[in-house]
Amino acid sequence: MAGRGPAPKAQHQRERDTKRRQADAIHLTRDGEIRGPEFPAWIDNPHPAALQWWENIRCSPQAQVLEDTDWDILAGAARGWNDFWRGTKTNATLLAELRLIGERYGATFVDRQRAKIQISREDPAEAEVVQLRAVNSRADVMARMKGEKR
């Protein structure tokens, strides 16, 4: 089965393309608020991993845009994950459906890129700063790999 191709790039060669594509994006802020309903009570004997999966969704920035019908679908997925982790249902069809549901709700970075969901932190100071060092030669790279300072 063919894949979907590479994830979309944030920047494009032409400035007007970049502006147009960024205007279509959904901009969300990670605010730490818990949204949505509690774990469905009709799921008997919930597995700890299923409970954690549900809480991750409730705390995620994507939860800001979820409607009641979305939560209903995610409750069905919670039942599927619970059955999978409990070992009561472990077939490929179930896993494929759970993967698709996760994809549609932006579970991974690539899924969010395809859905044009951009997540920023509430506090820009939380962003990790990575210091890049210039590489002048292959000898510099080899020295760094060996732990030597140049």
Image (cartoon, helix red, strand yellow):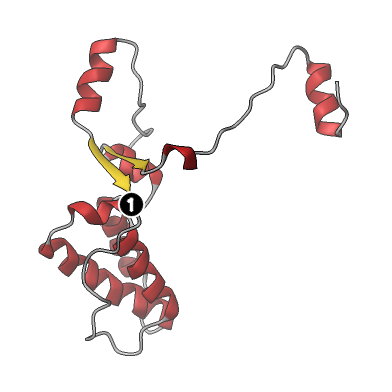
Q: Which amino acid type is marked by label 1?
A: Asp
Residue at the bottom extreme, as displayed = 45
> Is residue 38 depicted above or below 5 in this figure?
below
Residue 98 as seen in the image, left or right of residue 49: left
> Is residue 124 depicted above or below 52 in this figure?
above
Residue 81 as seen in the image, left or right of residue 73: right
Residue lying at 33% horizontally and 38% vertically, measured from the top left: 113
Residue 90 visible (yes or no):
no
Residue 127, percent from left and from top: 48, 39
Residue 112, percent from left and from top: 32, 43
Residue 17, percent from left and from top: 24, 16
Residue 111 visible (yes or no):
yes
Residue lying at 27% horizontally and 43% vertically, measured from the top left: 28
Tag 1 residue? 31
Residue lying at 26% horizontally and 59% vertically, measured from the top left: 101
Q: Nearer the viewer, residue 68 or 107?
A: 68
Mark 1 packing: few (<14 Cα in 10 Å), some, or many (20+)? some
